[in-house]
Image (cartoon, helix red, strand yellow):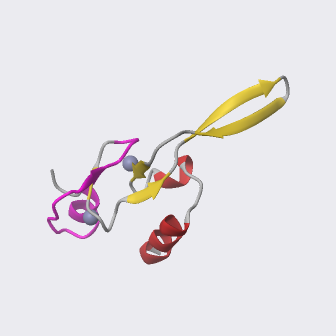
Amino acid sequence: MRCYDCEMKHNRTMEASATCSVCSAGLCGEHAIEGYAEEKAQWSLGNPAVVRLNGRRIFCETCAPDYLELTPTTRRAASLAG
Ligand SMILES: [Zn+2]
Ligand SMILES: [Zn+2]
Protein backbone atom coordinates (compact mmCIF):
# COMPACT_ATOMS: atom_id res chain seq x y z
CA MET A 1 0.00 0.00 0.00
CA ARG A 2 1.12 3.56 -0.69
CA CYS A 3 0.76 6.63 1.49
CA TYR A 4 -2.38 8.46 0.44
CA ASP A 5 -1.32 11.85 1.78
CA CYS A 6 2.02 11.70 -0.04
CA GLU A 7 0.30 11.01 -3.33
CA MET A 8 -2.46 13.60 -2.84
CA LYS A 9 -0.57 16.43 -1.15
CA HIS A 10 3.01 16.00 -2.29
CA ASN A 11 2.60 14.18 -5.57
CA ARG A 12 5.11 11.54 -4.57
CA THR A 13 5.02 7.83 -3.95
CA MET A 14 5.83 6.54 -0.48
CA GLU A 15 5.34 3.09 0.96
CA ALA A 16 2.71 3.12 3.73
CA SER A 17 3.65 1.79 7.16
CA ALA A 18 0.27 2.27 8.82
CA THR A 19 -3.42 2.68 8.07
CA CYS A 20 -5.76 5.40 9.34
CA SER A 21 -8.19 3.93 11.89
CA VAL A 22 -11.01 6.09 10.55
CA CYS A 23 -10.78 6.40 6.77
CA SER A 24 -8.39 3.48 6.10
CA ALA A 25 -6.00 5.60 4.07
CA GLY A 26 -2.45 4.26 3.83
CA LEU A 27 0.03 6.40 5.76
CA CYS A 28 3.81 6.64 5.78
CA GLY A 29 5.72 7.30 8.99
CA GLU A 30 5.68 11.02 8.30
CA HIS A 31 1.91 11.25 7.91
CA ALA A 32 0.81 8.70 10.49
CA ILE A 33 -0.34 10.36 13.72
CA GLU A 34 -0.33 8.25 16.86
CA GLY A 35 -3.05 8.73 19.42
CA TYR A 36 -5.83 7.22 21.45
CA ALA A 37 -9.41 6.77 20.45
CA GLU A 38 -12.10 8.13 22.72
CA GLU A 39 -15.67 7.09 23.14
CA LYS A 40 -18.46 9.17 24.58
CA ALA A 41 -20.06 7.52 27.55
CA GLN A 42 -23.11 8.48 29.54
CA TRP A 43 -22.30 7.78 33.18
CA SER A 44 -25.49 9.32 34.44
CA LEU A 45 -28.25 11.50 33.08
CA GLY A 46 -26.97 14.91 32.07
CA ASN A 47 -23.41 14.02 32.93
CA PRO A 48 -21.66 12.99 29.72
CA ALA A 49 -18.09 11.76 29.88
CA VAL A 50 -15.42 10.57 27.53
CA VAL A 51 -13.71 7.24 27.96
CA ARG A 52 -10.32 6.60 26.48
CA LEU A 53 -10.19 3.27 24.70
CA ASN A 54 -7.32 0.88 25.29
CA GLY A 55 -4.57 0.52 22.77
CA ARG A 56 -2.98 2.68 20.18
CA ARG A 57 -4.70 4.15 17.15
CA ILE A 58 -3.15 5.59 14.05
CA PHE A 59 -4.82 8.47 12.24
CA CYS A 60 -4.22 10.56 9.15
CA GLU A 61 -3.91 14.33 9.46
CA THR A 62 -7.49 14.80 8.34
CA CYS A 63 -9.10 12.43 10.81
CA ALA A 64 -6.83 12.97 13.82
CA PRO A 65 -8.33 16.18 15.28
CA ASP A 66 -11.74 14.59 15.71
CA TYR A 67 -10.60 11.44 17.39
CA LEU A 68 -7.68 11.93 19.67
CA GLU A 69 -6.38 13.71 22.62
CA LEU A 70 -3.21 15.51 21.63
CA THR A 71 -0.06 13.76 22.78
CA PRO A 72 3.50 15.10 22.46
CA THR A 73 3.85 12.98 19.32
CA THR A 74 0.78 14.43 17.64
CA ARG A 75 1.67 17.99 18.60
CA ARG A 76 4.99 17.56 16.88
CA ALA A 77 3.28 16.15 13.81
CA ALA A 78 0.77 18.98 13.77
CA SER A 79 3.45 21.63 13.92
CA LEU A 80 5.31 19.94 11.09
CA ALA A 81 2.16 19.92 9.00
CA GLY A 82 1.48 23.59 9.60
ZN1 LIG B 1 3.08 10.20 3.55
ZN1 LIG C 1 -8.13 9.23 8.04
The total number of labels drawn is 0
User: Is residue 20 in the magenta section?
Assistant: yes
Q: On the image, which quarter does residue 44 sit in?
A: top right
Please state which of residues 10 and 41 is positioned toward the viewer in this rendering: 41
Helix, strand or loop: magenta stretch: loop
The spot of residue 30 in percent (x, y) is 32, 68
The image shows residue 67, relative to residue 76, as above or below, that is above
Q: Position of residue 6 (x, y in %)?
A: 24, 64
Could one spot residue 61 in this view of the protein?
A: no
Check the image and name the residue furthest to the front.
54
11 sits to left or right of 32: left
Residue 59, can we see it? yes
Q: Is residue 37 above or below residue 27?
A: above
Residue at coordinates 14% horizontally, 65% vertically from top-left? 13
Q: Of residues 74 and 7, which is closer to you in this image?
A: 74
Identify whether 52 is placed above or below 28.
Answer: above
| Span of residues in magenta | 4-23
Where residue 63 appears, as percent x and y from the top left, is 45, 50
